[in-house]
Image: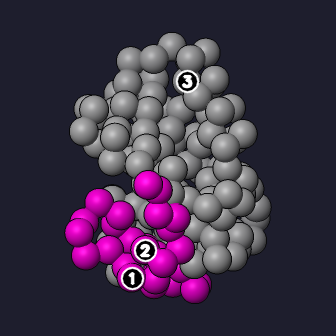
Amino acid sequence: MNLALDTNILAYAEGVNGPERQKQALDLIARIPEGKGVVPAQVLGELFHVLVRKGGRTRETARKAILAWCDAFASAATDPAAMLLATELAATHNLGIWDAVILATASKSGCRFLLSEDMQSGFNWGGVTIVNPFVPTSSPLLNSLLRDIP
């Protein structure tokens, strides 16, 4: 069972929004079993933008961070079929197009969960459930997937 990561999870892990949120994100990421995490290509682009604009990093430093995340997790491409699914999702469920692209790509990649603090937790589409991993009542199924770290 795979799970996809939204931009905010990786941005927090990079230290955007402070050390407390960074620790929470890094702890969460450490619990993802090897080979089970997916990062949609849209997330990589958004992360680059966040690191440069909000995080104050140089473009080269942001690029290196993107490369490191590509080494850590499988990346999922946005193909024309995912884009068409995203337009349907955006039109029928009133999502922003780029959030819809992330969700559609997660679905096409066989993910069961999309971890996001920004999207509507509990929303299910295309076999993917959005879960906010920072709330205490996150999904029991997600908790069973994540490794226990001593």
Q: Position of residue 66 (x, y in %)?
A: 62, 33
Residue under label 1, please give it: 140
Indicate whether residue 140 is drawn in magenta: yes
Name the residue nearer the viewer: 8 or 78. 8
Please state the horizontal and vertical placement of residue 111, each as a whole percent of the image.
Answer: 62, 73
Q: Amino acid at mark 2?
A: Asn
In this figure, which colouring scheme has been used for the structure? one colour
Q: As displayed, is residue 35 above or below residue 65?
A: below
Res. 118 visible in picture:
yes
Residue density around tag 2, few if under 14, some if 14–19, many if 20 or more, within 10 Å: few
* Left or right: 102, with 17 as reference point: right
Question: What x and y, as percent, mark residue 48?
Answer: 53, 32
Circles 3 and 1: CB atoms closer than 8 Å: no
**Residue 91 vs residue 45: left or right?**
left
The amino acid on which the numbered mark 3 sits, given as a three-letter code, is Ala
User: Quadrant of the rendered structure where residue 50 is?
Assistant: top left
Coordinates of residue 65 in the picture (x, y in percent): 58, 28
Q: Helix, strand, or loop for circle 1?
A: helix
Q: Which mark is residue 62?
A: 3
Q: Which label's residue is closer to the chain start, 3 or 1?
A: 3
Q: Give SS at disc 3.
A: helix
The alpha-carbon separation of the residues under discs 2 and 1 comes to 5 Å
Which residue corresponds to mark 2? 143
Name the residue rendered at 28%, 32% in the picture: 19
Nearest to viewer (mark 2 / mark 3) = 2
Mark 2 vs mark 3, CA separation in Å: 31 Å
Magenta-tinted stretch: 124-150
Q: Are marks 2 and 1 in contact (CB under 8 Å)?
A: yes
Between 51 and 28, the one lying in front of the other is: 28
The CA span between labels 3 and 1 is 34 Å
Q: Is residue 78 visible?
A: no
Magenta-drawn stretch contains 43: no
